[in-house]
Image: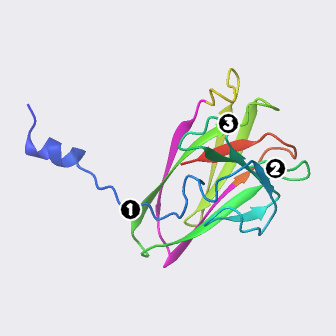
Amino acid sequence: AWNGALLKALTFTIGPNLLTNGSFEQPGGNMVTVPPTNPYITGWTVTRGRVVYVSNFFTCSDGKVCIDLAGSTDTGGGVSQTITTVPGSPYTLNFDFSGNPDGAPVKTLRVLVGGQSFDFSFDITGKSISNMGWITESIPFAATAASTTIEFYDTNPPGYWGPAIDN
């Protein structure tokens, strides 16, 4: 039997998505390698290296577009976005993570948010462009200012075929 205390413990609030273009669907179109500071991906800034705007190639987790954070052989790439937050308020960053099924078997990713760094890894063994094996990751954080920058970047050795993000 359900009682009020247990029901209250299971209740949670889902807030609005504060990210612009969180699934990278804009602008749409073809696969494009995007260099630093290029505003091609609506709402996002390429912060380091280059990234690949993957459209209609991988089976992305949400929609037709996702991002491969390794868009060049010289350095890993990264993307960021700054959102409006309320200092001291709790937030959760959810995203889907996979890896380009080519190249080294383990893809690594770092996420910077709320003044903290979080590392993730994904093993592509048995994965393909049609079976990416997407997993959802969650990062709870408390805002420390009126705006918070979220950055995702590749921490693999330089080269193509890196971590992929979506949703």
Q: Which residue is mark 1?
A: 16
Residue drawn at point x = 51 percent, y = 63 percent: 19
Q: Which residue is mark 3?
A: 58
Gap in angstroms between the C-alphas marked 3 and 2: 15 Å
Q: Position of residue 52 (x, y in %)?
A: 76, 50
Furthest residue to the bottom? 146
Q: Is residue 92 left or right of residue 59?
A: left
Which residue is at the front of the view, 42 or 15? 42
- Residue type at mark 3: give it: Phe
Q: Is residue 158 left or right of residue 100?
A: right
- Residue type at mark 1: give it: Pro
Which residue is at the front of the view, 95 or 146? 95
Q: Which residue is mark 2?
A: 71
Q: Nearer the viewer, mark 3 or mark 2?
A: 3
Provide the secondary structure element on which disc 1 rests. loop
Residue span colored magenta: 133-152
